[in-house]
Every structure is written in structure tokens, then in C-alpha cells.
């Protein structure tokens, strides 16, 4: 972590960088220009560095404790998250994950999915090293039927072989596929596992049963984790950028980064004390700007905050701050049209939610349930650590498949009872157990409807999540 002392040192060192001899010798743009270039490089590069850190731990370092599987290999997670799972904040208990990291350097990789029964939502998100959502397969985009799609790297110019339904183009040579399969309840897990068995990722030559091309050269991967990324951010950015093909809208920022030695070729950065302090100071300033933008992002609705995630390269359109905000707030988040995530820590009137101090309700009026084509859920987390909450009925969320077993209001609406204590047999079906402390809640709308009433476009749609009310 960069402390105030570090920042002071960076500022003092930056002053020494203004010496003409140093600037002239290194061909740098001067103290102000160098600092601004590094600050903008931080904002541009934050998603790339965050992605590399995750990729290193999930697909490269077998001893990381987070390792899933090597490149171009499927990994399935057939479990229901509970309060015992503490590795990932805000875990999703709606859709068990499958995952595969793709190495696209030698040849394309083929993603195959099975027939998925009607009524069971699933999606395959293809996210590249720039954290762009470059393609989707699944219920919303391609339907429930089986098929195979090809993911290609930047510059690929081949032809699409027989048996391939479409091509998804990554802007980077490495990409991530995230498979989400709807779970209806604990007893439904065997059915999810049956679907997961049909997910495949394989090199194109394996799919077509042809000779494989020469393998891509070995890479000397720099060791990475979250702490190293904080202290050596620009080194990781310089490394990761070499696998990202220059885009037309990146010309200005790449030229600016080149003035401080980040040239897109993986070239090592200067390691003098003054240079490192200058970069640390710029990273500190850039991170503060990103954090402020995250705090200001989204639209307030009845105490909930709803933030759009553009997702695709075209939707971001060169807005590097917006891309950094999306990565910082929740890297690999679905694009808004695939899923939308209202979240809250307050009542409709702004009072902080706390299970030790009150009881609350969340009421969906008649014909006012979240407007989705797939399903919706409301998940409870402890406000202090954003983890699931231990409770006597092992219930961590309420979702639309549970409605048939819930008690309805006289007008046809439904009320969720949010409290730490059991409300009794009559209301237990509608009980969302809360912690004995601060509350954080996330509403997930999978495949949100676009026709009215809709949450979309965010801030303009006719539907809004109802506010939480304190009742005792």
C-alpha cells in the first residue's frame, strides 16, 4: 500500500526529475508531462494489470492456492456457496461457475455447449485481457441449443471451418471464458453438473482433427499477486500490453505511454530511484481518481445503486476511466444487457441497514416483480465483509423460482422479511435471514427485459427496485 510517506517521497523525487540533464538524457517529457502520462497510463492499464494478476493465479501458478486449470482446459465448480466460503467477497449462489482461460497465440480455441433444457438460464461470457466482453453464448444470445463457436486472437485471418456457428474476436492473445448455469436449489445441483459435463474448450486443430500448428513460444511469466501489482504496477502493465493488439482509439494513449517507456513491446522500465518514485506517485494519484469515480458511479433508486457496465469495446469507445471503474467495481462483470446488479446498504430513506438494530421489509407490488427474461434474486451479505450470513435455515437468497412456495399479499404482491430472528412459521417462507450487524444486499436481474416496464436504460427505465422499509 502506498502511504503518505511514500507519496511525500515520490513528490520530493519528482522535483529532482525536473533537472534538465536527467530529462534530456532520458528523452522524457519533463516532470509535469511525465507525471500526467503515468497517471493516465494507470487509468488505462488498471484493467489489464488486474486481469493479468487473476490469470497468473488461476491459470499459470499451480501453487497460488487459486489455481483452477491450465490454458485451454475446462474447470467446473459444482457447489453451492455458503457462509463457510470466505475466499471471494459477494459470492454468487445463483449460477455455479465453469471457467477456461484461452491461449489464442498458436491457433483459435473452440467453445462448445450442449443442449440446455428450456427454462434453465445459462451464459458463456468471453472476456479478453482488456476486460472487454467480446462475445456471449447462451440463453439470451444464441438460445438453448448445442453448438460450437470459435474464439480467435487479434489479427487472425483464417476461414471458419464446418461445424462452427460463429467467430468471437478477442483484442488480446489471452482471454477468459466464464460459464454460468442457473441453479434452482440445492437438490438441483446434479442437473447443473449434467449441463457442465457438456461444456468444452479445445484448440481448433483438436476440434477439426487436423495437425496442430507449431506451439507458441514459452513465456517467462512475472510472478504476480495483488500486493505485487500495487508496488510494481507499471512493470506489469508494460508486460501485459505486449499481448494486446493496438486499437485505433488507443493511438493517443499509447503514444503518451511510450514517453515514459511503456512501448507495448514488453520492454523493461527504467529502475532508477527517481523514476520509480515518480511512477509510484502517479499510480497513487491515478488510483484516487478511479476510486472517486467508482464512488460516484451509478444511479440512485429508492436506496439502491444501479450501475451500467458497457462491456464491449464499442460501448466503451475509448473511455478509459469508465473501463477502469468497471474493473475496480467488479472485474469480469456481465454487460448490462446480460445481467444488472442493484445493490444497497440503506433503506429507501437513507438509513443504514443493520440487523442488530432493526427489522426490515422489501415489498414487490402486484405486477411489479423485477422484469427479466430469465430470473432474479436478492442475496444477503454481511455488510462488514460482504460474505454470506450463517443462519438456521441455510438460506442466503430469495429468487424467482422460490416464489411458488412463498406467502403472497392480499393484492398479489410479495413481501420479503429481512431480519436476524426467525419471524415464525407463517412468514418463514418469506424470510431472508440477516446478520446481527451491518447489511449489504445485491439484487441480480439475469437477462433484464428491454420492453416497458424495464430497468433499462438505467436511470430512464419505467421500473425501479422498491425501497427497503424499516418496520421495527
Image (spheres, rainbow, N blue to C red):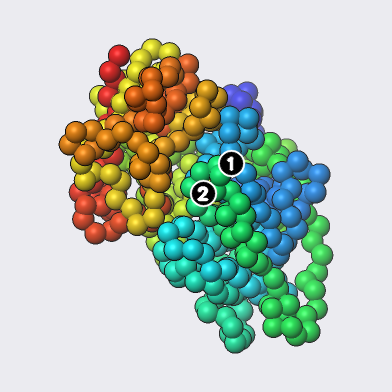
Residue 316 versus residue 248: which sits nearer the camera? 316
Could you tell me if the residues under marks 2 and 1 are in contact, i.e. CB atoms within 8 Å?
yes
Q: Which mark is residue 431?
A: none
Residue 57 appears left or right of 303: right
Q: Position of residue 141 (x, y in %)?
A: 43, 67
Question: The residue tagged with tag 2: helix, strand or loop?
Answer: loop
Question: The residue tagged with tag 1: helix, strand or loop?
Answer: loop
Q: How many marks?
A: 2
Position above or below: 85 against 399: above
Q: Quarter of the image containing the N terminus?
A: top right
Q: Position of residue 307 (x, y in %)?
A: 37, 45
Query: In which quarter of the view is residue 380 placed?
Result: top left
Position above or below: 147 against 7: below
Sequence order check: which comes first, mark 2 or mark 1?
1
Furthest residue in direction front, as rendered: 425
Q: Quarter of the image containing the C terminus?
A: top left
Q: Position of residue 353 (x, y in %)?
A: 37, 21
Q: Name the residue carrying label 1.
A: 80
Residue 293 appears left or right of 257: left
Query: In which quarter of the view is residue 168 placed?
Result: bottom right
Q: Residue at x 62, y 55 (%)?
A: 193
Is there any visible trace of residue 312 in the rendered image? yes
Q: Name the residue carrying label 2.
A: 183
Q: Residue at x 21, y 55 (%)?
A: 452
Amino acid at each position: 500500500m502506498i502511504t503518505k510517506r511514500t507519496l511525500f517521497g515520490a513528490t520530493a523525487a519528482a522535483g529532482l526529475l525536473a533537472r534538465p540533464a536527467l530529462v534530456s538524457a532520458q528523452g522524457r517529457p519533463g516532470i509535469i508531462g511525465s507525471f500526467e502520462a503515468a497517471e493516465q497510463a494507470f487509468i488505462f492499464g488498471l484493467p489489464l494489470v488486474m486481469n493479468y494478476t487473476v490469470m497468473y493465479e488461476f491459470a499459470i501458478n499451480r501453487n497460488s492456492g487459486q489455481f483452477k486449470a491450465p490454458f485451454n482446459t475446462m474447470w467446473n465448480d459444482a457447489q453451492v456457496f455458503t457462509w463457510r466460503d470466505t475466499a471471494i467477497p459477494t459470492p454468487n449462489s445463483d449460477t455455479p461457475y465453469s471457467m477456461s482461460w484461452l491461449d489464442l497465440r498458436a491457433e483459435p480455441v473452440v467453445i462448445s455447449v450442449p443442449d440446455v433444457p428450456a427454462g434453465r438460464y445459462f451464459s458463456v461470457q468471453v472476456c479478453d485481457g482488456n476486460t472487454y466482453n467480446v462475445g456471449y453464448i447462451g440463453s439470451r444470445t444464441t438460445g438453448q441449443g448445442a453448438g460450437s463457436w470459435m474464439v480467435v486472437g487479434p489479427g487472425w485471418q483464417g476461414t471458419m471451418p464446418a461445424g462452427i456457428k460463429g467467430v468471437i474476436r478477442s483484442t488480446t492473445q489471452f482471454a477468459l471464458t466464464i460459464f454460468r448455469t442457473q441453479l434452482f436449489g440445492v437438490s438441483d445441483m446434479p442437473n447443473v453438473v449434467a449441463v457442465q459435463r457438456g461444456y468444452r474448450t479445445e484448440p481448433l486443430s483438436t476440434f477439426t482433427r487436423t495437425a496442430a500448428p507449431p506451439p507458441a513460444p514459452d513465456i517467462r511469466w512475472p510472478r504476480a499477486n495483488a500486493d505485487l501489482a500495487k508496488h510494481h504496477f507499471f512493470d506489469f502493465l508494460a508486460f501485459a500490453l505486449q499481448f494486446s493488439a493496438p486499437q485505433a482509439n488507443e493511438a493517443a494513449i499509447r503514444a503518451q505511454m511510450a514517453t515514459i517507456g511503456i512501448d507495448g513491446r514488453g520492454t523493461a522500465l527504467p529502475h532508477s530511484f527517481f523514476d520509480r518514485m515518480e511512477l509510484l506517485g502517479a499510480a497513487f494519484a491515478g488510483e484516487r481518481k478511479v476510486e472517486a469515480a467508482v464512488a460516484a458511479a451509478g444511479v440512485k433508486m429508492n436506496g439502491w445503486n444501479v450501475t451500467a457496465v458497457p462491456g464491449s469495446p464499442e460501448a466503451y469507445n475509448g473511455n478509459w476511466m469508465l473501463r477502469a471503474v468497471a474493473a475496480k467495481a467488479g472485474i469480469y462483470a456481465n454487460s448490462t444487457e446480460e445481467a444488472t446488479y442493484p445493490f444497497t446498504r440503506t433503506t429507501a430513506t437513507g438509513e443504514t441497514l443493520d440487523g442488530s438494530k432493526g427489522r426490515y421489509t422489501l415489498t414487490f407490488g402486484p405486477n411489479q416483480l423485477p422484469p427479466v427474461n430469465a430470473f432474479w434474486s436478492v442475496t444477503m451479505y454481511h455488510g462488514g465483509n460482504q460474505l454470506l450470513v450463517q443462519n438456521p435455515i441455510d438460506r442466503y437468497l430469495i429468487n424467482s423460482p422460490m416464489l411458488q412456495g412463498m406467502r403472497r399479499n392480499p393484492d398479489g404482491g410479495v413481501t420479503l422479511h429481512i431480519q436476524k430472528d426467525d419471524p415464525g412459521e407463517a412468514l418463514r417462507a418469506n424470510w431472508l435471514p440477516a446478520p446481527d450487524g451491518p447489511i449489504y444486499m445485491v439484487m441480480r436481474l439475469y437477462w433484464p427485459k428491454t420492453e416497458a416496464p424495464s430497468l433499462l436504460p438505467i436511470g430512464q427505465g419505467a421500473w425501479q427496485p422498491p425501497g427497503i422499509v424499516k418496520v421495527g
